[in-house]
């Protein structure tokens, strides 16, 4: 279903009928990306936020399914690369690209039917400066820095019947994520899982508003 090609001209990822060029400063689609891609359901006309778009793969797939997509990233190379890939896959009119940290580039009154984030979720040693590629996977000392900041704000940008899809690893405490969603009034559960070694699995968490 997916494959990767490395050549002197750079990396390419193929997924379904789409192709994605991946700049050297941009996260290369991996197991976590494909877990999200395989479980991405979008209805025609839905407003979708692809947070941390990387090479644009999730945003492009969501737009191909009929979504109107806003794709964001803190990495300017990612946005440039994602923009090119949106054009390459004939879908650029349905995606808007914005640079910035988490919800900073989102207007306070913007609401989304789907907010998808393959977050930086791995625990990492504290370093003074991180490269853009390190920022794609590093979630700070406990792996939760970006995840927690995301969960604390996400419900304000979710439409009434909206849903969140968040990817993380078992190394960054899945139960804590479910609890933190609950504290924000969202009901969350693990809907897909992939083992990536003896000691780690990657999960896809779906969260929706609790019924009152
Ligand atoms: C694991 S990669 C996922 C890339 C792509 N969505 C995929 O699934 O292949 C995480 C992405 O989130 C971006 N990112 C990291 N921290 C962010 C933040 N605070 N706000 C927005 N994007 C962020 C990274 O630059 C990177 O492109």
Image: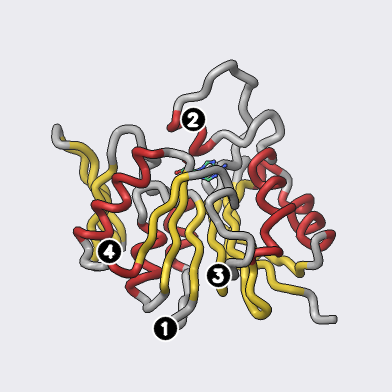
The residue positioned 53% from the left and 51% from the top of the image is 105
Per the rendering, the mark at residue 134 is 2
Closer to viewer: mark 4 or mark 1: 4
Q: Position of residue 150 (x, y in %)?
A: 66, 50
Could you tell me if the residues under marks 2 and 1 are in contact, i.e. CB atoms within 8 Å?
no
Q: Quadrant of the C terminus?
A: bottom right
Residue placed under numbered mark 3 in the picture: 114
Closer to viewer: mark 4 or mark 2: 4
Marked residue nearer the N-terminal end (4 or 3)? 4
Q: Is residue 59 left or right of residue 188?
A: left
- Label 4 environment density (alpha carbons within 10 Å; few <14, some 14–19, many ≥20): some
- Label 3 environment density (alpha carbons within 10 Å; few <14, some 14–19, many ≥20): many
Q: CA distance from mark 3 to mark 1?
A: 12 Å
Q: Secondary structure at mark 2?
A: helix
Residue placed under numbered mark 4 in the picture: 92
Q: CA distance from mark 4 to mark 1?
A: 16 Å
Closer to viewer: mark 3 or mark 2: 3
Q: Secondary structure at mark 1?
A: loop
- Seen in the picture, residue 101 relative to 53 is either above or below; the reply is above
Q: Secondary structure at mark 3?
A: strand
In the picture, residue 117 is in which quadrant?
Answer: bottom right
Q: CA distance from mark 4 to mark 2?
A: 27 Å
Residue placed under numbered mark 1 in the picture: 44
């Amino acid at each position: 279903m997916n494959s990767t090609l490395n050549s002197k001209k750079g990396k390419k990822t193929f997924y379904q009928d789409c192709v994605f060029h991946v700049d050297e400063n941009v996260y290369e689609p991996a197991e976590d990306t494909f877990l999200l891609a395989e479980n991405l359901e979008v209805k025609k006309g839905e407003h979708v936020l692809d947070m941390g778009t990387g090479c644009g793969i999730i945003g492009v797939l969501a737009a191909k399914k009929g979504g109107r997509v806003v794709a964001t990233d803190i990495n300017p190379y990612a946005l440039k690369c994602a923009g090119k890939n949106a054009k390459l896959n004939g879908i650029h009119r349905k995606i808007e690209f914005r640079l910035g940290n988490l919800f900073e580039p989102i207007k306070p009154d913007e609401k989304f039917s789907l907010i998808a984030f393959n977050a930086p979720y791995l625990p990492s040693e504290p370093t003074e400066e991180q490269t853009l590629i390190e920022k794609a996977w590093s979630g700070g000392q406990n792996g939760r820095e970006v995840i927690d900041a995301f969960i604390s704000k996400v419900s304000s940008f979710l439409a009434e019947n909206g849903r969140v899809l968040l990817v993380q690893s078992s190394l960054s405490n899945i139960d804590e994520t479910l609890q933190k969603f609950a504290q924000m009034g969202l009901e969350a559960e693990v809907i897909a899982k992939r083992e990536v070694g003896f000691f780690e699995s990657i999960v896809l968490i779906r969260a929706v508003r609790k019924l009152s």
